[in-house]
Image (spheres, helix red, strand yellow):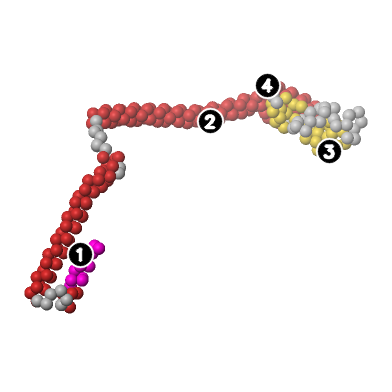
Amino acid sequence: MWITLPALWAICSDRFLTGKICRNRETHITFGKGLLILFKKKTEDNAAVETKTASAQAPEEAAKAEETKPAEETKAPETVDVGALQKALSAAQAETEKVKAELAQLTDIRLRLAAEYDNFRKRSQREKDAIYTDATAAGVMALLPVIDNIERALAVENASAEDMRKGVEMIGTQAAQAFEKLGVAAFGAVGDAFNPNMHHCVATVAAEGVESGAIALVLQKGYKLGDKVIRPAMVQVAE
């Protein structure tokens, strides 16, 4: 039967203390020392075995740890090509300068276009104002002879009714000629079909010899310039 060293030590110690092994005190001491030496040697042997085991396992654990290292930790550092970087930087700077030049050119073009458009707008407004002024002046010029004849008729003293009538007829003819010169035409006559875009109906009346919906009476003539109605005719319409 095998017995461990600690158990043997416990048994011997108990017997040593109770005096069951040796009766001689010196013998007891010698036996105790022997047991201590034996226990110490056994402990040292166990420690040596554990050290050898740990030493044998250390390389294997180190190899496993080396295998489990991330690839990026064992990867050799990459070399940097300074010349290539300088070339890339120079190319980028050249491209930047090119873009700046193009931007400056486009900005200049935009400013020029804005200035030209502003000048065009002002010039167009001036031309529009000038056209209106010229058209007004032409109308006034065409009517001035009519005004002159009215003033002459009013300057005559003691004129007969017949002379006044002839004078008014002449002025009316002259005014019609002035309108014709300006392109202004009169419209609105009895019997014409009523047109709400050109005629202003003030009443509907019963009229003999006039169709229903036609103009029965013209109270005020209308005038137009081309297709533009200057003033609608004021009329009465037959029922």
Give the position of the C terminus as an image quadrant: top right
Secondary element type, mark 2: helix
Q: Residue at x 20, y 71 (%)?
A: 11
Q: Residues within 10 Å of mark 1 (few under 14, many from 20)?
A: some
Magenta segment includes 50: no
Left or right for 23, reference 72? left
Upstream in sequence: badge 1 or badge 4 = 1
Q: Which residue is at 76% across, 27% downward?
A: 187
Left or right of 227: which side holds 71? left
Answer with the quarter of the image where residue 68 lies.
top left
Residue 5 image label: 1
Does 4 appear in magenta? Answer: yes
- The CA distance from mark 2 to mark 1 is 123 Å
Task: Answer with mark 2 or mark 4, whichever residue precedes in sequence.
Answer: 2
In front of the other: 83 or 154? 83
Q: Residues within 10 Å of mark 2 (few under 14, many from 20)?
A: few
**Quarter of the figure with residue 213:** top right
Residue type pointed to by label 2: Gln
Of the residues shown, which amino acid type is indicated by label 4?
A: Lys
Q: CA distance from mark 2 to mark 4?
A: 27 Å
Which residue appears at 23% of the width and 64% of the height?
Answer: 3
* The magenta segment: 1-13
How far apart in space, not on screen, are marks 1 and 4 (Cα)?
148 Å
Q: Which residue is mark 2?
A: 125
Residue under numbered circle 3:
203
On screen, residue 88 versus residue 220, left or right, reads left
Determine whether 43 is above or below 88 in the image.
Answer: below
Which residue position holds label 4?
A: 181
* Frontmost residue, 211 versus 71: 71
Counting residues from the N terminus, which is met first, the one under dot 1 or under dot 3? 1
Select label 2 or label 1 by which is in front: 1
Which amino acid does the dot numbered 1 rest on? Leu
